Image: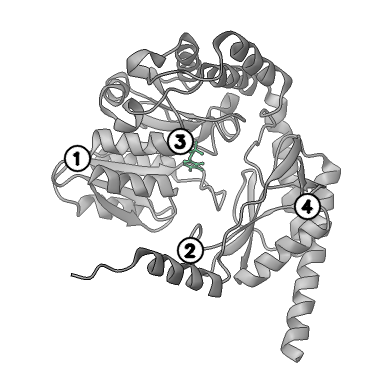
Amino acid sequence: MARPDLHDRLQAQRELRSAQGRIRVRRSVGRRDGVRLQLDGRWLTGFCSNDYLGLSQQFEVVAALQDAAAREGAGAGASHLVCGHHALHEALEREVADWLGYPSALLFGSGFLANLAVQQALLGEEGDVCVQDRLNHASLLDATRLAGARLRRYPHLDAEGARRQLAHAPEGAAMLATDGVFSMDGDLAPLRSLTLVARMQQALMYVDDAHGVGVLGPQGRGSVADAGLGVAEVPLQLVTLGKALGGHGALVVGEERLVRHLAETARPYIYTTAMPPAQAAAALAAVKLARRDQWRRERLVESIAAFREGAHRRGLALMASETPIQPLLGGDEAAVMAMSAALEQDGYLVGAIRPPTVPEGKARLRVTLSALHTAEQVAGLLDALARARDAVAAAAVATAAG
Ligand SMILES: *Cc1c(COP(=O)(O)O)cnc(C)c1O
């Protein structure tokens, strides 16, 4: 038996990515100050971070991290079930459960791990199925594979499609999982229809609200609360700490017996070191600010409206999003990359998102807004976007002419 040479295979794959212009490089940020980022020694205005409320460098959040680190050190020392579970973890779980109006919460090292944990712990017997929106986050899709359940996808936002998939699934346990706010499109899942489908089809409804919590709904309680729903309709949901809450980590909030089952059986919970207690202290401070500071959400709403209105006036094609995620669809990957480069020349950092993160032919600039952006910065970005579009179009005409 001759095995394939792994290095040869990787080399061929890399050459293919290179031919497609899809080599990914990391850029390192030298310094960060609010929405400003220093890259290669130059300060740029960033419209690419998920720090929607501007909490990651907020004074009280950083002070909480420093104080707790001074007392408790840099790490938890062990997993939660050994001796790493700290009173600060517990306080954070209680605060988030109270904020969202859920009975229980469980803290995880990251949202990716939490999504793996939920499906691994709840699904995986013969005939179990997880029905998901086609554009769900990669971690939700990967989780079904880890769980050993069947994955069935429905067209984006299509509750009737979800119903059909559930109705035709085998007779095992079923979960209906969706992003609350879609991370690359910024649009909202039809949660009221989906929760009805889940109830009729006896599926467990799970909402990944990584981009909704802190931003949407009363007191920033997220997509589920924004839709007028709660634990009765959505027995489990994911809250991440790395986006609007400006930190790192995630919680699953839910019905007590489901959350207890996760704590006792989820491998991505049990076999990993607990979050540093100081990080939990920072998150606790951030959650309190997110609950209290309505002005951060008001500023965001103003920026979103100004951005959309200004883009419309300049003939920039937007997607149907009312959230801080405001993508500009480019289609052609080369044009999107060229626009991103032109924006950077002009002093703005905007993420260019390409397949496989988004479907083929759907490359885009992913503009994200923060409560810290000023009206001048938003207006400056709009002008820069229009200039970049015109420059890229002119270059395309020149190339075609020959
Ligand atoms: C970012 C994200 C995650 C992963 O969360 P991390 O804490 O960054 O690992 C999960 N789901 C969605 C929808 C996300 O956007």
Res. 353 image quadrant? bottom right
Per the rendering, the mark at residue 267 is none
Q: Return the disc, 2 or 4, that comes first in the chain's sequence.
A: 4
Q: In this view, does 136 lie to the left or right of 47?
A: left
Q: How many labels does the image show?
A: 4
| Tag shown at residue 111 | 3
Of badges 4 and 1, the one in the foreground is: 4
Q: Position of residue 49 (x, y in %)?
A: 65, 42
Q: Please give the residue where the numbered disc 2 appears in the rendered image.
A: 359
Please tell me whether mark 3 sits on a helix, a strand or a loop: helix
Q: Which of the two discs, 4 and 3, labels the residue nearer the N terminus?
A: 3
- Separation of marks 4 and 3 at Cα, in angstroms: 28 Å
Note whether residue 385 is visible: no
Outermost residue toward the bottom?
402
Q: Are the residues at dot 3 and dot 1 in contact (C-beta closer than 8 Å)?
A: no
Q: What residue type is labelled 2?
A: Pro
Q: Looking at the picture, tell me which residue is in the foreground, 3 or 45.
A: 3
User: Which SS class for mark 1?
Assistant: loop
Which residue occupies 30% across, 38% down?
Answer: 119
Label ID, residue 173:
1
Marks 3 and 1, how far apart in space? 23 Å
How far apart are the alpha carbons under marks 2 and 4?
25 Å
Residue 131, how many percent across, how many down?
30, 49
